[in-house]
Image (spheres, rainbow, N blue to C red):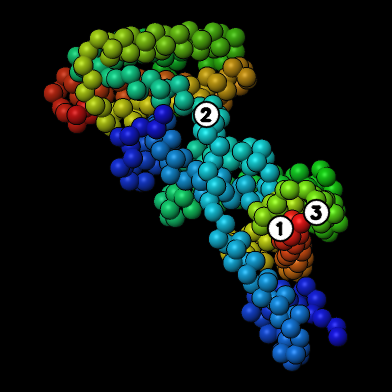
Amino acid sequence: MVHLNEETLSELLEGASVTGVEEHLASCPVCRGELDALRRLRSELRELPELDAPPELWSRIEARLPVGGRARRTRRGWPSMIAIQAAAMAAVFVIGLGLGRMFAPGDQAGPGSQLVSERAAATSLADAMAEVRRLGAQYDAALRNLEQLAAQEGAPTPSLAEQRLASLDALVEASRTALSVEPADLVLNSYLFAALEERAAVLRQIRAEQESGSEVLWR
Amino acid sequence: MREEGLVDLTEATLVRRARAGELEAMRELYERHASRVYTVVRRLAGDDDLAADLAQDAWASAFQKIREFRGEAAFGTWVHRIAVNTALTQLRQAARRRNLEQSFNGSSTLGNPDRLPASGAAERVTIQRALDLLPDGYRSVLWLHDVEGYTHEEIGARLGIAVGTSKSQLAKARARLRALVAESRAEVVDHGAS
């Protein structure tokens, strides 16, 4: 007797009707057994247990996330309102100063859209790169100051502004990481400037909120 | 270390915070779905080391493009899909390097029962191991169809093969798996008797 081939058995497992097969199955215990075995095997496959991910996997993933460093910083606690205000003003000052130098007077579209590529055209790429590095150093200094103040003061929980700042910091760090590989990339430089400029705007907003006594940004 | 304070947060909140770059939120999302993601890539890969690499790539990719996640499906479903796509893409690339035709024609020695341990060996071949012994092409089609519920059209699109090829591979994969499992069970019986 010729038995059913694997393709026919597979079709039957799918529930397809195959012409002339019913009679064969009725009279052939071997093929019936094969079909039952395949059915059981499919059930067993579906019932295989979920597996635990290797314990070291998260650290491998974390190492590839550009936000890792910044996120760790948020664990250390946040400064009091006064400390934030002082640090924010300092950061606004240094970043604002740097950005003010970067963009020529009379720039109609504003610094957010007129980034390093145009600056590079006005002077040289080397000058623009030097300015990026200088601004970055100032940014780091302001951030360190913020963290120092945070460590000294209490730690109220920030909300919306925290998220915005965290997001911008992540962008700054990501841009820097990329720039360390491709330091002359104009697009990456543009991202970095945009992030710094936006961050300065957020800090200005925080200062304005603090001065007006608003409690919207900080709980 | 997993942050206890995040355990009670909804997934939507975690996603929002992960989008803002909060590492702890990403960690919590990872913890909630790590097993599911690892399991699917491990089943498709057939190998522990490769599975770890694939899971790493899938999660890194998910967090890098988390802003694209719109919440139309559950986060777990979204990251699972990324994991499947990551695994299939890399397996296909690997198959190309090794000669795709050989793998998908099933002529690879990887799935050959002769490659199983000799009947005298104490090692038992479970379904899981039998699955690992299938050629990559067989294993992918079998797992995607019989467990993940993909249609042959979807499998064809993802693996770059014709629908008919997917059906044919599935039939061969089932038969090969059945033979591998039957053989391993026979070995166990044989050992029990001796």
Say what amino acid the circle numbered 2 marks: Ser
Mark 2 = which residue?
A59
Q: Earlier in the sequence, mark 1 or mark 3?
A: 3
Q: Name the residue rendered at 80%, 51% in the picture.
A: B120
Q: Is residue B28 left or right of residue B131?
A: left
Q: Is residue A107 left or right of residue A26?
A: left
C-alpha separation, residue under disc 2 versus residue under disc 1: 44 Å
Return the residue nearer the eye: B36 or B181: B181
From this viewpoint, which residue is outermost toward the front?
A: B194
**Label 2's element?**
helix
**Label 1's element?**
helix
Q: Is residue B62 left or right of residue B17?
A: right
Mark 1 = which residue?
B192
**Chain for numbered disc 3:** B
Indicate whether B37 appears above or below A121.
below
Mark 2 and mark 1 residues within 8 Å of each other at the beta carbon? no
Q: Residues within 10 Å of mark 2 (few under 14, many from 20)?
A: few
Q: Residues within 10 Å of mark 1 (few under 14, many from 20)?
A: few
- Give the number of the disc on residue B119: 3
**Chain for numbered disc 1:** B
Q: Name the residue rendered at 52%, 16% in the picture.
A: A119
Q: Position of residue B77 (x, y in %)?
A: 48, 53
Indicate whether B67 appears above or below A138.
below
Q: Quadrant of the N terminus of chain A?
A: bottom right
Marks 2/1 same chain: no
Indicate whether A55 appears above or below B93.
above
Say what amino acid the circle numbered 1 marks: Gly
Say what amino acid the circle numbered 3 marks: Ser
Looking at the image, is mark 2 or mark 1 nearer the viewer?
Answer: 1
